Amino acid sequence: MPIINKHSTAKKKAAPLSGTALVIVLLVVSVALATVYAREGQDGPLHRVQSIAGMVTAPLQLAGAGVAYAADGAGDAVENATVSDSSYTALQQENAQLRDQLVQMEELRQENERLTALLDIQSQYQISGATGRVIGTGSDAYSREITVNVGSNSGVEPGQAVVGPSGLVGQVTEVSPLTCRVRLITDPQSGVSAYLQSSRDECVVKGAVDGLLYLEYLDDSVQVEVGDVVVTSGMGGSYPAGITIGTVTNVVNQAGTSDRTIIVSPLSTVSALEEVTVVFSSSSEGSDSQSGSQDAGDSGDTNADASSTDGEGSVDESGEGE
């Protein structure tokens, strides 16, 4: 009779399932669970287990999404860092070019405005002449002049009037082939035959060392108001008639006398002058036919009498006449 080993029998009963058998068991269980899950309602035990499992794993899913987003952001940052070095210089150069273009456009805009104003005044007085750029200014109070880059090669001659975008500027005194020097109407040696636009009364506008214009040789009976416009009369032929010189800004009456100081502010200032036009001819030429006017108005820059060449102007600001 054979002897049975109890220990070996127990070991055979406790042997684990093989891999194939385990797969079969899991498939059977899965099919059974799927069948039960499909047949039970939303309140069934398998549905409740699914809901609980979803709530338990939701934080883990969110954490995983956050990690993935952070990883994507870190990747973008690394990518941007790698391209920034190569593109930063290019962006700087592009910005510099754009700034330069804006500056150039603004310069062109302002130049267009100035030249348009010059064309307007040329059209208004039917002026023919040579337009040039101011390339130099004098700093001496006793000699207020500018240099313009047009000369005899362009038809410029001494004695010709010069206008700016706002009105009369001065008179040509010296000419070279390519440039000319212009004595401004604010120069102490300058004198312009003029009249008050409101009353048509004749006078002379003279420059002074203080850079102001003084209205002289006006009859004491003529009423003058601040804001009155002063224009060239054309007497003597040095300047075309009707060109605006400036406006009256102050009238100082001397107490107890009929003397008064009349200050005129020029419309064209040196600081604003960049382009000017030398006048060859205008529609107002020949207006000096009124030859019976006063001697003080018989010339342009030469009408300043001896008392105005001492460097102190014709009238000082204290209101004392000559």
Image (cartoon, helix red, strand yellow):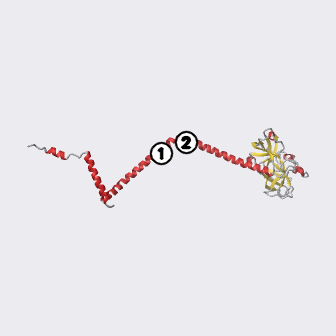
Name the residue rendered at 76%, 49% in the picture. Answer: 119
> Residue 200: x percent and y percent?
85, 56
How packed is label 2: few (under 14 Cα within 10 Å), some, or many (20 or more)?
few
Name the residue rendered at 90%, 51% in the picture. Answer: 289
Closer to the camera in the image, 319 or 26: 26
- How far apart are labels 2 and 1 at the CA level? 17 Å
Q: Is residue 195 visible?
A: yes
Closer to the camera in the image, 303 or 108: 108
Are circles 2 and 1 on residues that touch, CB within 8 Å?
Answer: no
Which amino acid, by three-letter code, is at mark 1?
Answer: Asp
How packed is label 1: few (under 14 Cα within 10 Å), some, or many (20 or more)?
few
> Residue 229: x percent and y percent?
80, 55
Name the residue rendered at 38%, 52% in the picture. Answer: 61
- Mark 2 lies on residue: 88
Name the residue rendered at 31%, 55% in the picture. Answer: 34
Tag on residue 222? none
> Residue 16: x percent and y percent?
22, 46
Front: mark 2 or 1: 1
